[in-house]
Amino acid sequence: MQPATLSQPAEKTMSQTALQWDEILGTDKTFVIAEAGVNHNGNLSMAKELVDAAIEAKADAVKFQLFNPDTLASKQTPLAAYQAETLSDQKTKTQHDLLASLTLPEEAYKELQAYAAQRGIMFLCTPFDEVAAQYLHHDLQLPMLKIPSGEVTNLPFLRMLGRMNTPIILSTGMSTLAEVQAAEAALRQENPDLPLSLLHCVSSYPTTPDSVNLRALQTLDQAFPNCLIGYSDHTLGWNVTVAAVALGARIIEKHYTLDKDLPGPDHKMSLTAAELKAMMQAIREVESALGDGVKQPQPIEGDCIAKARKSLIIRKDLPAGHQLSLNDLAIKRPGTGISPAQLEAVIGKTLTLPMAEDSVLHWEHLR
């Protein structure tokens, strides 16, 4: 994204930011995070199957979530509306109940990380508290941390993350621009050069297309020239996700599942493994289609240039030495001769050889 109102210094900073993140992410293409989240339902074997599905889809990274139900939610915190709608187990009355059913033991994350490394995909995880962040950063030594939208206003947590001096990807659902600015300031309070990516996001599960507001990507891009901008998508399907890539999102995060009918809060709004693979193919096609932005003929247009454009054509048999007038010339296909754009330059020129009717005129025929 290159907003027209950005000053030259901001454009330079954005370029430096992009190069910095290219090195962190290991690619200059859109970096796609397959968000397994809690769709393992507390089962390590299912979590590994989710890793396999991300690899099959050719995602760049697979991501899970690490939290402690006791420190994340009060036992009185009610379920969100979408959680209540997707849960058939009437025993699950609170967020604490739900979260407790979706945890994996701490050692499972080491095993998942090793499994992902063995299979050749980057392993990422979202921490929801300081203890989880320290574990992921110091023990697992993850290359970056992804922070959820719910922590945008948790400035003490963000300041702690900034002191860890690890690249941060922050989702910005539920946030005003001012709140995002405060979050950026907190993260960079002690480290102004902290690598930071901001993901536009709408925290509704699923998000309806009319609520997505994809143009906010451009707003973030203009407001935060020192950040890489991306999109965390909660819409059904992947049309909106691909549109975000076309608008310039450099990081994409998308939930997926092994089965949309599994019990749990996120399965129904997630992509299937097959859909995740199709989304990846669509994203790469759109990236290829974006090109370099220079308006010029493409190499594959060569045949059409020759066949569909027009040239100056001799209207009737003419002898050598004839001085050309407008009545001597027609404009017809093919486009292999002198362009009709050069008509005025041709009038008054003299033929160097006889020309037959319907011949294509070239510069070497004239003096």
Image (spheres, rainbow, N blue to C red):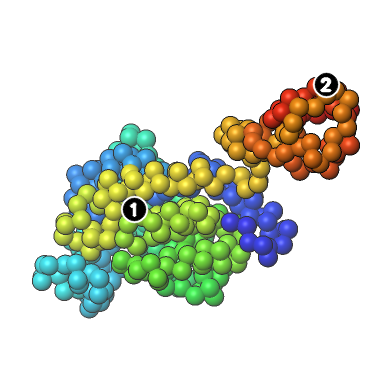
> As shown in the figure, which amino acid type bears the numbered disc 1?
Glu
- The picture quadrant where one finds residue 365 is top right
Mark 2 falls on what kind of element? loop
In the image, farthest residue toward the top:
353
- The picture quadrant where one finds residue 87 is bottom left
Instruction: Look at discs 2 and 1 and give the one toward the viewer.
Output: 2
Evaluate if marks 2 and 1 touch, with contact meaning CB atoms under 8 Å apart. Answer: no
Position of 15 compared to 350: left or right?
left
The residue beneath circle 1 is 35
- 84 versus 35 height, above or below: below
Pick whichever of labels 2 and 1 is earlier in the sequence: 1
Image position, residue 356 (x, y; %) = 73, 25
**Res. 142 in view:** no
Which residue does the image show at 62% across and 48% down from the upper left?
A: 293
- 65 versus 114 height, above or below: below
- 335 versus 273 height, above or below: above
The quadrant of the rendering that contains the C terminus is: top right
In the image, farthest residue toward the front:
317
Residue 353: mark: 2
Viewer-nearest residue: 296 or 251: 296
Position of 186 compared to 318: left or right?
left
Which residue does the image show at 50% across and 61% down from the upper left?
A: 198
Which residue does the image show at 11% across and 67% down from the upper left?
A: 89
Image position, residue 297 (x, y; %) = 64, 40
Image position, residue 34 (x, y; %) = 35, 49
The quadrant of the rendering that contains the N terminus is: bottom right
- Label 2 neighbourhood size at 10 Å, few (<14), some (14-19), many (20+)? some
Which residue does the image show at 42% across and 67% down from the upper left?
A: 212
Mark 1 falls on what kind of element? strand
